[in-house]
Image (tube, rainbow, N blue to C red):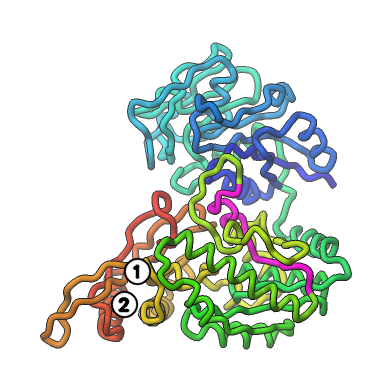
Amino acid sequence: MRRDTILVLDFGGQYCHLIARRIRELNVYSEVVPHDVSPRDIKHLDERLNIKGLILSGGPTSVYDEQAPRLNDEILSLGLPVLGICYGHQLLALMSGGKVKRASKKEYGVANAIIDKPRGVLRDLDKQEEVWMSHGDNVVAIHRDYEILAHTKNCSIAAFRHKLKPICGLQWHPEVTHTKSGKLMLRNFVFKVCGCEANWRTEDFVERSVREVRQVVGEGKAIVGLSGGIDSSVTAILATKAIGGNLTAVFVDHGFMREGEPDFVKRTFQNLGVNLVSIDAATIFLERLRGVIDPELKRKIIGEEFVRVFEKAAENVGADYLLQGTIYPDRIESGIRRHSDKIKTHHNVAGLPSKIKFRGVVEPLRDLYKDEVRKVGESLGLPEDIVWRQPFPGPGLAVRVVGEVTQEKIDIVRKADRILREEIEVSSLSKKLWQYFAVLTDTKSTGVKGDSRAYGYTIAIRAVESREAMTATFAKIPYGILEKVSTRITNEVPRVVRVVYDVTHKPPSTIEWE
């Protein structure tokens, strides 16, 4: 059956794949395609998928930049509904004869949009709506065939639509949670404008992924990098279903794990019947990071060293393929797309060395978000404590130490992290939070311990709420819990004299500090 599908045209915006994720939440299938997709490409896709509409994503460039990505002119003649978001909104205006100018005052963050005409995508909205803006250019004029639907204090044309054709644009981002009625806007586009049916489920993914792994690896052997997190765990189980005994799971203890983590991982997956090999490489990783301060370099070194360890493990078992638990946010933040900005290198994406000894790298989860991966994990019967483990970066505590990594610093942040996790978990807050962890900053300050002056480290506590890690809100943890965490850390970790709490959303920050 050809599933109703919305194509998201990628103009390099960090939220591009979040748009696709939001469409999937409506149980409508979505795929991300390059911005310069041709009408012929879309017709070819339509043989497999029932293409019902197009969404043009945001992007980091100005429509007037010399290298700005463009849309094939013929796309708008296909008769498909089109929604432009941010950059896509500006591009639609420009292509139809409107004007875009550099804004006298940039809009970044929450803004109040006045809904002048609640039609089409804006159907059933209130007169005033909170929306998330992130732009430096404004649409200042539109063609006479279009009408203005909304404005803000600093943007006179914040939403528009064609008077006869199903083409519309939104300057704000309906895909982020900060736009209060964003889901309703997307629902209006998907169901009211495009006429889609809700006929897609995440569970459909399992059969497709098992088939893909089997096709790529064939009769060969493969290893999977297993950290014990939900991403690599689901990858390991999917691959086991696909190639059975030809899979070896490799757990690399790089010395930057949380307290008790190596034993937990080995015990859990041995009980699940996974063919597991554990490698202690802590000394090698620490030595490779000696004197390294730059966080990007840290991630690249760790990524390269992981592959070298995997290569040796693969040689021992005769494996030609490497499977990884790479997911959408990893790929997006690593800036793998032509017009996207790199936020940070993920050790298993842009951190991979250019030359590897594997015949191929297989990433069955590359198009899923964390919450989708959890659903797949549940459908595969993974234990709850694996499915709901909070995300943990591949480089581990090495990127939770700001500056040079030393064994002393790793020991400090590991103890602080254990204390924080203990207090969060006994408070019943853990399932409400996306992530919570300690960071050892590179700031020292004066304190008092035992009536004597102490000069020591500062620990930062980070706790956020999120649905998919593309956006996040800092958690409003009760002061009583924060006080207990702070008291325990400064009492139980001798070199720490100060604890601070990070109250920054994503954006503008990222969840991890490095």
Question: x, y (%) of residue 394?
Answer: 55, 69
Q: Is residue 157 left or right of residue 106?
A: right
- Which disc number belongs to residue 298? none
Question: x, y (%) of residue 345?
Answer: 53, 57
* Camera sees residue 239: yes
Q: Which residues are the magenta region?
A: 319-336
In this view, the residue in front, 346 or 178, is 346
In this view, the residue in front, 303 or 24, is 303
Residue 323 among those drawn in magenta: yes
Considering the image in quadrants, where does the C terminus appear?
A: bottom left
Helix, strand or loop at label 2? It is: helix
> Upstream in the sequence, badge 2 or badge 1?
1
Question: x, y (%) of residue 203?
Answer: 73, 61
Q: Is residue 97 above or below residue 338?
A: above
Contact flag, marks 2 and 1 (Cβ < 8 Å): yes
Question: x, y (%) of residue 346?
Answer: 55, 60
Quadrant housing residue 206:
bottom right
Residue at image coords 73%, 35%: 52
Indicate which label's residue lies in the foreground, 2 or 1. Answer: 1
Label 1 packing within 10 angstroms: few (<14), some (14-19), many (20+)? many
Helix, strand or loop at label 1? It is: strand
In this view, the residue in front, 218 or 364, is 218
**Residue annotated with mark 2:** 485
Residue at image coords 12%, 84%: 452
The residue furthest right is 219
- Which disc number belongs to residue 461? 1
